[in-house]
Image: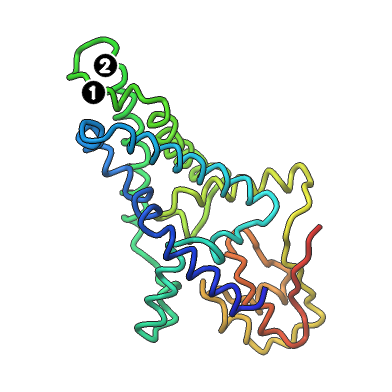
Amino acid sequence: MKQKNRVKLQAVSTILTFPFALLIILAPVLVFFIHLVNEANGTALSVFAVIGISFWVLISISSLFLQRAHCSHTCAITGMFTFFAFIFHNPEIMRTKYPRIIYHVVLSLWIIAPLYVYIRCIGNKVGFLPYNSAFDNVFVIVFYSLFLLSSVFTKTTGKSNTAHYICPFSPCMISMIKLGEFLKIPSRKFVTDSTKCVNCGVCAKNCPMGFKVNELVKTNQFNQKECINCGRCIDGCKNKAIECRYF
């Protein structure tokens, strides 16, 4: 996909889904207030949880066939960073290395939030905590259980040095990519040819994640699990040392 089309798709997706994506990211904090939402509109809470689960499943399954194309084509958070990079004329925004403490705080919330839901659910059954039907809602329980699943994947198969700081989908996506590789499921892949690389550095300059793509190509160490599959390196390579194929 040419960059203009990709950017347009990302812009539309960001406009349509950013508020919802932001709510998902903030869900581990908002868990302590969902009883208030439930009292006001329990149906809305259920709908949010169902849509959240659907997003999670759809994005994870798509990773089996499209790798991390979601991150660069339809992710609202990536779209937000792209927008800020354009507004502030600073392409380095996406390459920012955030303090490790942020990762530990976010990971802790991914664990604490579902545990809080489980405790409140048990409290409803046993009666040692004030009853609230939000914590008997199976969709809410499943939705928050996915955060716990992501925390497990983050520490095992779904490690990522770029996205899992704030994105709960990323560990699941990377785990699904590895599963696809194990099962030999055909998927969208970037193929490199070190013999065609002249080490011009254009690919590295174009990479929004700040990877030294030319060095990875030359040494045959290109890691697509870290790559967000935007294709800017491919479009910038005149020698076709990097190509996108489906196999």
Mark drawn on residue 124: 2
Write the residue at 78% across / 65% down: 245
Query: In this rendering, is residue 76 above or below 90?
Result: above
Q: Residues within 10 Å of mark 2 (few under 14, many from 20)?
A: some
Q: Where residue 12 sits in the image (x, y, percent)?
A: 49, 67
Disc 1: which residue: 132
Please say if the residues under marks 2 and 1 sit with CB atoms less than 8 Å apart.
Answer: yes
Q: Residues within 10 Å of mark 1 (few under 14, many from 20)?
A: some
Instruction: Using the numbered discs, state the Cα–Cα distance from disc 2 to disc 1 in whole angstroms.
Output: 7 Å
Q: Where residue 88 sits in the image (x, y, percent)?
A: 35, 83
Write the residue at 49% across / 63% down: 13
Q: Which residue type does callout 2 highlight?
A: Asn
Is residue 32 visible in this depiction of the protein? no
Instruction: Please state which of residues 120 and 163 is positioned toward the viewer in this rendering.
Output: 120
**Which residue occupies the extreme top position in the image?**
126
Write the residue at 77% across / 81% down: 240
